[in-house]
Image: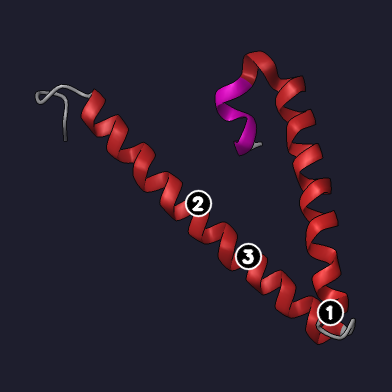
Amino acid sequence: MLALHHYGHRAATAAAVIGVLQSGVAGLVSPFVGLLGGDQVAMMCVMLAAAALTLLVLATGTEKREAEQVQAQGPDQRS
């Protein structure tokens, strides 16, 4: 699992946090399906919005992490 890649020494705790976050986000987001009508189209819209938000967060976090890794490398190690 990619989410646990950097936390192998704390895999059980990391897995528990991921599970709590998944359940919590599902509980917070599910009412939006009802507000939008409660049908398949509402579910699809909420899922697409969640996926778009996830990609945005991933892209933002990845750029920052890659920039930090490049800065951590010495000038002779950059490719």
| Main SS, magenta residues | helix
Q: Which callout, 2 or 1, points to the residue nearer the camera? A: 1
Q: Quadrant of the N terminus?
A: top right
Amino acid on which disc 3 is placed: Ala
The one of 76 and 62 positioned closer to us in this rendering? 62
Categorize mark 1 by other alpha carbons within 10 Å: few (<14), some (14-19), many (20+).
Answer: few
Provide the residue span drawn in magenta.
Answer: 2-7
Amino acid type at image mark 2: Leu
Q: Element under label 3? A: helix
Identify the residue position indicated by label 2 in the image.
58
Q: CA distance from mark 2 to mark 1?
A: 27 Å
Query: What x and y, as percent, mark residue 56?
Result: 49, 60
Q: How many residues crowd mark 2 within 10 Å: few (<14), some (14–19), many (20+)?
A: few
From the top left corner, tell me how far across and down residue 43 is, in percent.
81, 76
Sequence-first tag of 3 and 2: 3
Residue shown at 60% from the left, 37% from the top: 2
Q: As drawn, which residue projects farthest toward the left?
A: 76
For residue 35, the mark is 1
**Residue shown at 16%/35% (left/top)?**
79
Spatial CA span between label 3 and label 1: 19 Å
Residue at 77% x, 21% y: name it. 12
Q: Please determine whether, in this image, residue 64 is positioned above or below residue 41.
A: above
Quick one: label 3 or label 1, which is nearer the N terminus? 1
Q: Which residue is mark 3?
A: 51
Chain-order first, disc 2 or disc 1: 1
For the residue labelled by badge 2, is the local secondary structure a helix, a strand or a loop? Answer: helix
Amino acid type assigned to the residue bearing label 1 in the image: Leu
Residues at circles 3 and 2 in contact by the CB criterion of under 8 Å: no
